[in-house]
Image: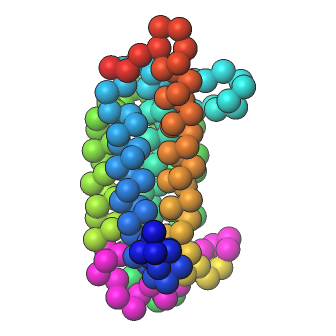
Amino acid sequence: MPQYIVAQYGDKRRYLMKALREIAHRIEGLVVGLDEHALTARADDALAEDWCIKEIVGFLRDSEREDLHVLEMMIERDGAPIAARRAQYGPVDHDYRGARIEDLVWDFMMLREETVWNLRTAGGAWEHVGIDPYRGAVTLIERVQEMNERDLDGMWRIQRLVDHVTSAPGGRRG
């Protein structure tokens, strides 16, 4: 337990890199083995979930692609301009439901590994800022914290959908 506290509060960079990897693996574990019905089902209104599991994973993959590009720019140059986020539109812009979950997860995991590698080798660039068109200066560590929060939200939403679908009458995994 003391190592966790030190990592979280003493070295936020190490904590965030660990969280990014572990949450991505947890998301992968949640969706592997689910059948197509479970991956594309939407929950009832009680859960207020408007995206299916494939759409959430697709959104995470596209967000990761955008964030990786931004992180690379910020690491390379302090004060780099950051493009506005597009992945936030998710299923509105893409047909994730027709994609294979294996492809979505594979792409997400490979992008995540590249993200973590870039962060491991970032050195002093953790203090660099990027200039967001709406928010102004955003530090690299703030951007990574936002990625972690997005991952946690996505994981929580996927877990709720998995629980809902697998607990429904006739619900099943793969």
Q: Is residue 41 above or below residue 32?
A: above
Q: Closer to the camera, 48 or 170?
A: 170
Q: Residue 155: x and y, percent?
A: 50, 45
Does residue 46 appear in this view? yes
Q: Residue 58: x and y, percent?
A: 43, 41
Q: Is residue 167 left or right of residue 102?
A: right
Q: Closer to the camera, 105 or 165?
A: 165
Please name the residue shown 33% across and 20% down the image.
174
Please name the residue shown 52% across and 27% down the image.
163
User: How many numbered circles are shown?
Assistant: 0
- Magenta includes 136? no
Please name the residue shown 41% across and 16% down the image.
172
Does residue 130 appear in this view? no
Quarter of the image for residue 97 reads: top left
Residue found farthest to the front: 1
Range of magenta residues? 118-135
- Magenta includes 120? yes
Please name the residue shown 60% across and 74% down the image.
132
Q: Closer to the camera, 168 or 48?
A: 168
Q: Is residue 25 left or right of residue 163?
A: left
Q: Is residue 80 above or below residue 115?
A: below
Q: Is residue 149 above or below residue 53?
A: below
Q: Residue 70: x and y, percent?
A: 44, 70
Quarter of the image for residue 57 reads: top left
Q: Is residue 22 left or right of residue 55?
A: left
Q: Quadrant of the N terminus?
A: bottom left
Residue found farthest to the bottom: 124
